Image (spheres, rainbow, N blue to C red):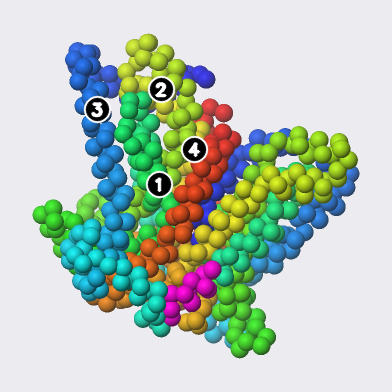
């Protein structure tokens, strides 16, 4: 379900968890070791029973479904046929007979979407955190801090539907605003197939529209993380650097950025998974259009189920998504964590 | 903290470049007026950001207040002429275009999200305790499974959940389990439970073990320690876990839109989505805006009430990371 909402708040939990487990067992009382495991198993039993039934079983069933031609006509009880790896092959060769379906274009767009978004989330988030954290007086500092997290607090579903209407050609706020500034305002934000940046021909105008929305939505999270980390940097480091003659630019790159890293790395890893799976913004604003060019993996997976009703293919597609995510996580774990001083 | 040793080759080059751009003389001269100009610029920047952040919010508010029931909003005004709360009244008292009233959807969303969050938290708490405080075979695998399951986006198990819940007929009612609010809640539990366990385990991990040990020295068994020591300590985390589960269910769309077919069972998220028609001239703009506000308000209030907790939760993550 809406893991966007859930997860964004739980933040960094899963990600730090990986590290914690890697670095060895957390210190805890060693009850139960060596003797009797009945008690912990008893404590886990209720949750395990529920999870086994409603989470684990569907996942296993998903693997079975991915090997069959399960579609709508099998819902009434006649069993689907076993087709082996045919679903996977048809997905990877774009042979589903669905218009605008292109797995590789979707994957490439999804990666582009994630990288650009996270880049802006992090840079804007840190920049504004720095601005709000400056030593000299800021009138209404606390006011700004609390209003700025507004985009994060709003349900993504509502944000996306509202922005979709804001990009409406005739009545949307974006074109009306451009009009009142005297700029040509008949822009077909979501339908135009033109690529504004010519050497990025695969990115239609709609990409920049959804990028704007998701940047609007995503930077406050990074700001909050960066603010927390900034406030834990001891001020005398900067004083010492000033005495040594380092200018502020140098202080930023030699003190602030390295000391922000430990907090930002898990946030970036977490934020990129979140952005990679940002269903709401894409589905409600562009619906994957124009002509499937802003489709991402999760919106495509959804459409395979609803309205297409290709349950077997959708199951296979989800399994592919899982491996894509696994690869991304492993790569990130390796390279981003390598940046840390440990 | 070895800050100097961190210097990355790339970074050093950037530093050199920066040094050249800002010559010393300039720096001296700007010392007097510099800070004041900077103050002004900083505030201007903050006000600009404020406007960008609030723009959509203000737009929705102004639409909701517009009395012309807005077939065509063609100008941008914060308080439109003749502003009224009529759109809110219409949303709350009259059925939407799909013939379902706001309160029916409200009740459906409430039942599903509240039910899910209570059930999930109740099941999660003992498991979280076991994972945080006991060592047992399979523990690592269990934790790894939680991470793996959480990595899956909600869409990823849509197909099997739909097919499986569709194969069960509800006795009495002439319907598939999939199409009922109970079926929808079961699907929500499926994705919410691993997260809840993980979340509570993370919180229990941060608690010192001294209190439990003291209780055990006094002769309490692990069960007593759990009930008398841990449970009271994690009440805030239980409340937060419950609220997070609630908030997720409150605006969930993917499962609801796929599962629910009967109009009387649609949720608020589905209602809002169906308000926007195929063509822009059909959108009842005022009512759409009013409904957006009504759905958002509880979530935003809860968010700001719990904000402290989120931020400290993040800080813990930062320290551990």
* Dots 4 and 1 on the same chain: yes
> Are there few (<14), some (14-19), or many (20+) residues within 10 Å of tag 1?
many
Identify which residue is drawn at 70% across, 53% down.
Answer: B125
Does dot 2 land on a helix, a strand or a loop? Answer: helix
Q: Say which of A39 and A92 sits in front.
A: A39
> Are there few (<14), some (14-19), or many (20+) residues within 10 Å of tag 4?
many
> Are there few (<14), some (14-19), or many (20+) residues within 10 Å of tag 3?
few
The residue to which callout 2 is attached is: A254
Question: What whole-number distance in Å separates the C-alpha atoms at marks 2 and 1?
Answer: 28 Å
Quadrant of residue A319 in the image?
A: bottom right
Tag 2, which chain? A
Which residues are the magenta region? Answer: B100-110
Q: Which of the two marks, 3 or 4, is nearer to us in this view?
A: 3
Question: What whole-number distance in Å separates the C-alpha atoms at marks 2 and 4?
Answer: 17 Å
Q: Is residue A326 left or right of residue A158?
A: right
Residue A102, placed above or below residue B44: below
Does dot 1 land on a helix, a strand or a loop? Answer: loop
Question: What whole-number distance in Å separates the C-alpha atoms at marks 3 and 4?
Answer: 30 Å
The residue to which callout 1 is attached is: A149
Residue A190, placed above or below residue B303: below
Q: Which of the two marks, 2 or 1, is nearer to us in this view?
A: 1
């Amino acid at each position: 379900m809406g893991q966007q909402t859930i997860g964004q708040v739980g933040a960094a939990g899963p990600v730090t968890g990986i590290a914690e487990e890697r670095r060895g067992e957390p210190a805890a009382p060693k009850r139960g070791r060596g003797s009797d495991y009945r008690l912990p198993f008893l404590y886990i039993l209720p949750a395990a029973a529920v999870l086994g039934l409603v989470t684990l079983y569907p996942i296993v069933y998903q693997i079975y479904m991915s090997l069959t031609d399960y579609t709508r006509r099998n819902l009434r009880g006649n069993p689907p046929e076993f087709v082996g790896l045919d679903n996977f092959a048809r997905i990877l060769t774009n042979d589903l007979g669905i218009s605008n379906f292109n797995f590789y274009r979707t994957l490439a767009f999804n990666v582009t979407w994630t990288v650009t978004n996270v880049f802006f989330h992090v840079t804007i988030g840190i920049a504004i955190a720095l601005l709000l954290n400056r030593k000299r007086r800021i009138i209404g500092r606390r006011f700004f801090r609390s209003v700025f997290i507004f985009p994060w607090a709003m349900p993504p579903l509502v944000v996306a539907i509202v922005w979709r209407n804001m990009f409406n050609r005739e009545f949307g706020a974006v074109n009306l605003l451009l009009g009142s500034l005297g700029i040509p305002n008949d822009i077909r934000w979501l339908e135009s197939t033109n690529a504004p940046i010519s050497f990025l021909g695969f990115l239609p105008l709609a990409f920049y529209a959804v990028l704007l929305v998701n940047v609007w939505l995503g930077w406050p999270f990074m700001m909050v993380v960066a603010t927390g980390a900034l406030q834990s940097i001891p001020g005398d480091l900067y004083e010492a650097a000033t005495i040594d003659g380092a200018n502020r630019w140098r202080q930023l790159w030699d003190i602030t950025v390295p000391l922000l890293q430990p907090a930002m790395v898990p946030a970036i890893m977490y934020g990129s998974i979140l952005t990679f799976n940002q269903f709401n913004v894409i589905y409600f604003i562009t619906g994957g259009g124009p002509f499937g060019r802003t489709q991402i993996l999760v919106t495509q997976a959804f459409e395979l189920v609803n309205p297409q009703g290709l349950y077997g293919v959708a199951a296979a597609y989800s399994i592919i998504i899982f491996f894509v995510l696994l690869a991304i996580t492993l790569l990130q774990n390796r390279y981003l964590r390598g940046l840390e001083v440990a | 903290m070895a800050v100097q040793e961190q210097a990355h080759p790339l970074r050093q080059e950037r530093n050199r470049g920066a040094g050249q751009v800002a010559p010393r003389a300039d720096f001296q001269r700007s010392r007097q007026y510099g800070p004041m100009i900077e103050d002004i610029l900083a505030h201007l920047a903050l006000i600009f950001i404020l406007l960008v952040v609030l723009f959509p919010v203000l737009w929705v508010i102004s639409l909701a207040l517009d009395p012309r029931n807005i077939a065509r909003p063609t100008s941008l005004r914060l308080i439109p002429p003749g502003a009224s709360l009529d759109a809110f009244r219409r949303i709350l008292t009259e059925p939407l275009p799909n013939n379902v009233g706001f309160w029916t959807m409200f009740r459906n969303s409430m039942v599903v999200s509240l039910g899910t969050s209570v059930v999930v938290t109740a099941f999660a708490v003992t498991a979280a305790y076991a994972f945080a405080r006991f060592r047992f075979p399979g523990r690592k695998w269990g934790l790894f499974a939680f991470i793996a399951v959480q990595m899956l986006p909600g869409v990823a198990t849509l197909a099997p959940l739909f097919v499986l819940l569709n194969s069960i007929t509800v006795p009495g009612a002439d319907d598939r389990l999939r199409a009922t609010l109970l079926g929808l809640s079961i699907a929500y539990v499926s994705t919410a439970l691993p997260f809840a366990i993980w979340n509570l385990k993370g919180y229990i991990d941060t608690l010192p073990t001294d209190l439990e040990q003291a209780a055990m020295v006094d002769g309490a068994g692990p069960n007593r320690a759990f009930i008398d020591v841990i449970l009271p300590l994690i009440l805030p985390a239980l409340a937060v876990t419950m609220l997070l589960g609630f908030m997720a269910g409150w605006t969930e769309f993917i499962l609801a839109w796929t599962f629910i077919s009967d109009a009387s069972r649609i949720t608020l998220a589905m209602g809002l989505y169906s308000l926007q028609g195929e063509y822009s001239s059909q959108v009842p703009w005022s009512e759409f805006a009013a409904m957006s506000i009504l759905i958002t308000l509880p979530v935003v209030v809860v968010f700001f009430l719990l904000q402290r907790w989120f931020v400290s939760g993040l800080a813990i993550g930062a320290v551990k990371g």
